[in-house]
Every structure is written in C-alpha cells, then in structure tokens.
Image (cartoon, grey):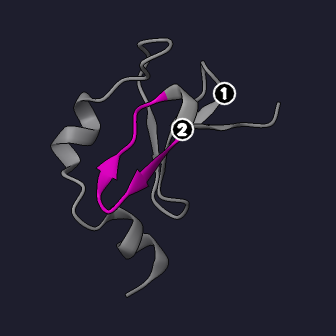
Amino acid sequence: MAKNEKASAGVDPKLLELLVCPVTKTTLHYDAEAGELISEAAKLAYPIRDGIPIMLPEEARKLEG
C-alpha cells in the first residue's frame, strides 16, 4: 500500500468536506501524502490517525511561515 493510500484509508471524503478548523472555522486542505488536514488560516496541520481526523489544536503540528 502506498503512503498516500495508507494516509487516506478509511477517511470518508464527505467527512473531509464537512470538517473545518476548530480554531478559525475556515475550510481545511487535505494533504494525502502527509496524512494531514491543513488550516492555512491557523497555520496548523491536524493529523489523521487510523482514518480518524484528530481535530484538537494541541495535537496539531504548527506550520512554518
């Protein structure tokens, strides 16, 4: 299984369309290669673990810039 297939395995595309950043309430960009949901507004990357988006700001990775 390729890395991007593993990252997106079990994530419902409709769920990804509905999720917003819990900090800014803005839309998220799905980075399939990294297995993360990106909030450009908050400069955070929320991880996806075992197909479940972890939407906790304290679990998010801070983005550079």
Q: Amino acid at mark 2?
A: Glu
From the image, which quarter does the N terminus lie in? bottom left
Graded by Cα atoms within 10 Å as few (under 14), some (14 to 19) or many (20 or more), the crowding at tag 2 reads few
Residue depicted at x 32% and y 63%: 50
View extreme (front): residue: 58
Q: Which span is picked out in magenta?
A: 46-56
- Specify whether residue 55 is painted magenta: yes
State which quadrant residue 58 falls in: top right
Residue position marked by numbered label 1 in the rendering: 43
For this orientation, the residue located farthest to the bottom is: 1
Tell me the quarter of the picture where residue 44 sits: top right
Identify the residue at the far top of this view: 24
- Asked which secondary structure carries label 1, the reply is loop
Point out the frontmost of discs 1 and 2: 2
Percent of width and height locating residue 61? 64, 40
- Determine which residue is flagged by label 2: 59
- Badge 1 amino acid: Lys
Side of 30 relative to 38 (left or right): left
What's the residue at 16%, 42% (across, down)? Answer: 14
- Pick whichever, 45 or 59, lies toward us: 59
Residue at the image point whose x is 44% and y is 31% from the top: 28
Label 1 and label 2: CA atoms lie apart by 13 Å
Residue 15 image point, x, y percent: 20, 40
Q: Is residue 16 above or below residue 49?
A: above
